[in-house]
């Protein structure tokens, strides 16, 4: 018996037809594309504005600049770059472990009703204006820390960062960093909490079924899965700390010094704080100098976010679901 092959059976299979987009899909796609283009255009325009407006600050003649006072721009701005990075780094070191601990408690340890209340409070703290944190830090928190600073100086003064003469007002770079840590704590906690809740339940149950304690389950299943999310939350908090203005302005004096000491009256300040404090008196090339300082802050913030994205993408191949 022979079989015959019809032309339809022998014909090559045609390529799958493209799905037909409905009007709603087209509108959504076009809106998302337009939003992305607007964001990129806005970022480019901001960068162009900062570059153009800051050009006069890099001129060699600084005798008529009421901000530089005869210094070169790089000499003037370096202490504020240091203060920005130093204060933000301390805030991140203090806030990150606390945020991870609170997020783990809400997501894996606390009762459901208490977790809901704590989550609501965390989200509410993220909406508090920065000037409120600044007033609290300058009027209440700084005086409360004075005895603690004297204790640090007395018993840990052999460590360089705690040496010297502690301030009597409590307004130091450490106080400003702690205020920044309180400010970035809610957003870091909220992101870590959401990431922890996305851990596959099968992985958690498998770890518990193998005899792991709850902490061992968290260490082996939850934290590895959420590592990239933790980094993203930390970098987002760091970005807010780098750009914070009023909270630091109300706590620190505008001194252009470079020191790692955390307790002395003379402290470095940040770029946003010096811009806010000196802008009312700036004119002509002084305004360009402050804009140039803003350009430096823009570059630093962009670099921090770029590094964070690189870290997250580097771990993108790992997933707790694999």
Image (tube, helix red, strand yellow):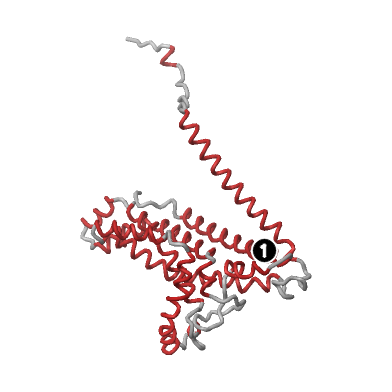
Viewer-proximal residue among 72 and 210: 72
Q: Which residue is mark 1?
A: 292
SS of the residue under disc 1? helix
Considering only vertical position in the picture, is 122 above or below 177? above
Numbered-mark total: 1
Left or right: where does residue 22 sit relative to residue 207?
right
Considering only vertical position in the picture, is 130 above or below 263? above
- Residue 70 is situated, as x and y percent measured from the top left of the image, at 74, 75
Viewer-proximal residue among 179 and 257: 179
Quadrant where the image shows the N terminus: top left
Disc 1 packing (10 Å; few <14; some 14–19; many ≥20): many
Residue 147 falls in which quadrant of the image?
bottom left
- Residue 310 is situated, as x and y percent measured from the top left of the image, at 51, 56
Left or right: where does residue 35 sit relative to residue 190?
right
Residue drawn at 35 percent across, 11 percent down: 3
Residue lying at the far bottom of the rendered structure: 154
Residue 34 falls in which quadrant of the image?
top right
Residue drawn at 71 percent across, 67 percent down: 286
Residue 218 falls in which quadrant of the image?
bottom left
- Residue 73 is situated, as x and y percent measured from the top left of the image, at 70, 70
Left or right: where does residue 317 sit relative to residue 115?
right
- Residue 231 is situated, as x and y percent measured from the top left of the image, at 44, 60
């Amino acid at each position: 018996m022979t079989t015959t092959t019809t032309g339809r059976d022998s014909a090559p299979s045609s390529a799958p037809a493209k799905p037909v987009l409905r009007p709603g899909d087209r509108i959504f796609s076009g809106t998302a594309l337009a939003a992305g283009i607007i964001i990129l255009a806005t970022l480019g325009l901001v960068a162009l504005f900062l570059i153009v407006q800051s050009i006069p600050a890099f001129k060699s003649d600084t005798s008529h600049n009421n901000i530089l006072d005869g210094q070169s721009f790089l000499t003037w701005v370096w202490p504020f770059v240091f203060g920005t990075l130093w204060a933000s780094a301390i805030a991140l070191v203090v806030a990150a472990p606390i945020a991870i601990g609170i997020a783990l408690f809400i997501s894996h340890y606390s009762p459901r009703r208490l977790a809901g209340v704590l989550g609501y409070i965390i989200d509410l703290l993220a909406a508090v204006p920065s000037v409120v944190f600044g007033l609290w830090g300058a009027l209440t928190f700084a005086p409360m820390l004075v005895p603690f600073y004297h204790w640090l100086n007395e018993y840990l003064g052999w460590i360089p960062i705690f040496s010297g003469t502690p301030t009597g007002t409590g307004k130091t770079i450490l106080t400003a960093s702690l205020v920044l840590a309180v400010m970035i704590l809610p957003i870091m906690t909220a992101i870590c909490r959401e990431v922890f809740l996305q851990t596959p339940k099968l992985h958690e149950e498998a770890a518990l079924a193998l005899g792991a304690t709850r902490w061992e389950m968290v260490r082996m299943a939850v934290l590895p899965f959420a590592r990239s999310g933790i980094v993203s939350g930390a970098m987002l908090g760091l970005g807010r700390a780098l750009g914070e203005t009023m909270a630091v302005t109300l706590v620190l004096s505008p001194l252009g010094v470079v020191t790692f000491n955390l307790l002395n009256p003379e402290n470095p300040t940040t770029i946003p704080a010096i811009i806010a404090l000196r802008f009312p008196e700036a004119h002509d090339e002084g305004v360009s100098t402050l804009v140039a300082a803003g350009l430096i802050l823009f570059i630093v913030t962009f670099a921090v976010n770029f590094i964070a994205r690189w870290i997250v993408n580097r771990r993108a191949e790992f997933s707790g679901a694999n």
